[in-house]
């Protein structure tokens, strides 16, 4: 007998063990960020702890570090069309966990054909001890009709990153 297909979100709700030990810090550009608050609402029952961190990049990094986060994910809206996922990288060093998560984000977000993964030296990526990714969403992807797709994609990215190998302690 064929089993009915279930969405990744439903499967995660049934088996949260993949994320159950994670402490996730979510960076918001302001308190009203609907993508971050929606993601936090979905992650809270599935993760060990979830914290929304606010302020400038250094303040967010400090909050994530004091929270002892296993992973940081920030989201910003931009005017461009691309989806960009940034992780920490400088000549001679890169965050392998951050890069793997950034690549998962680009794979899982709604296809625009303009997904880019970039190593950067931004304060939030440099100062956060946990693997950190800053996601910049192009115009329209934070709008109400796209928001649920984006949140589900960000959830799938975190899940695939977590189960692909244990990045939770490697930067």
Image (cartoon, helix red, strand yellow):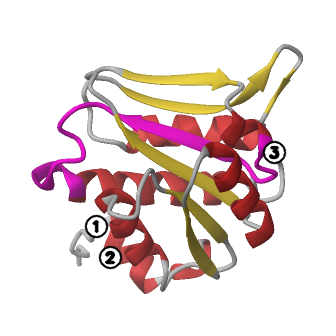
Against 147, is 22 above or below?
A: below
- Residue designated by label 3: 171
Residue displayed at 64% across by 39% down: 100
Residue displayed at 83% across by 58% down: 169
* Quadrant including the N terminus: bottom left
- Residue designated by label 2: 10
Residue stretch in magenta = 127-147
Sequence-earlier tag: 1 or 3: 1
Picture coordinates of residue 123 (x, y %)?
Answer: 71, 36
- Residue designated by label 1: 7
* Quadrant including the C terminus: top right
Residue displayed at 40% across by 64% down: 31
Against 153, is 6 above or below?
A: below
Sequence-earlier tag: 3 or 2: 2
Q: CA distance from mark 2 to mark 1?
A: 5 Å
Q: CA distance from mark 1 to mark 3?
A: 30 Å
Secondary structure of residue under mark 1: loop
User: Is 143 covered by the magenta stretch?
Assistant: yes
Picture coordinates of residue 45 (x, y %)?
Answer: 48, 86
Can you tell which quarter of the image residue 41 is in? bottom left
Q: Residue furthest top?
A: 91
From the image, state whether disc 3 or disc 2 is nearer to you: 3
Q: Residues within 10 Å of mark 3 (few under 14, many from 20)?
A: some
């Amino acid at each position: 007998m064929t089993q009915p297909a279930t969405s990744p979100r439903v499967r995660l709700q049934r088996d949260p063990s993949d994320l159950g030990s994670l402490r996730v810090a979510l960076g918001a550009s302001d308190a009203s960020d609907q993508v971050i608050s929606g993601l936090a609402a979905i992650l809270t029952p599935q993760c060990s702890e979830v914290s929304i961190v606010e302020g400038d990049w250094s303040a967010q990094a400090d909050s994530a570090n004091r929270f002892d986060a296993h992973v940081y994910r920030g989201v910003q809206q931009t005017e461009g069309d691309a989806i960009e996922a940034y992780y920490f990288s400088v000549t001679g060093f890169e965050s392998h966990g951050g890069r793997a998560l950034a690549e998962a984000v680009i794979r899982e977000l709604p296809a625009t054909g303009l997904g880019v993964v970039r190593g950067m030296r931004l304060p939030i990526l440099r100062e956060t001890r946990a693997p950190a990714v800053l996601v910049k969403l192009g115009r329209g992807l934070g709008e109400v009709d796209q928001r649920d797709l984006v949140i589900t994609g960000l959830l799938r990215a975190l899940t695939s990153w977590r189960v692909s190998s244990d990045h939770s302690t490697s930067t």
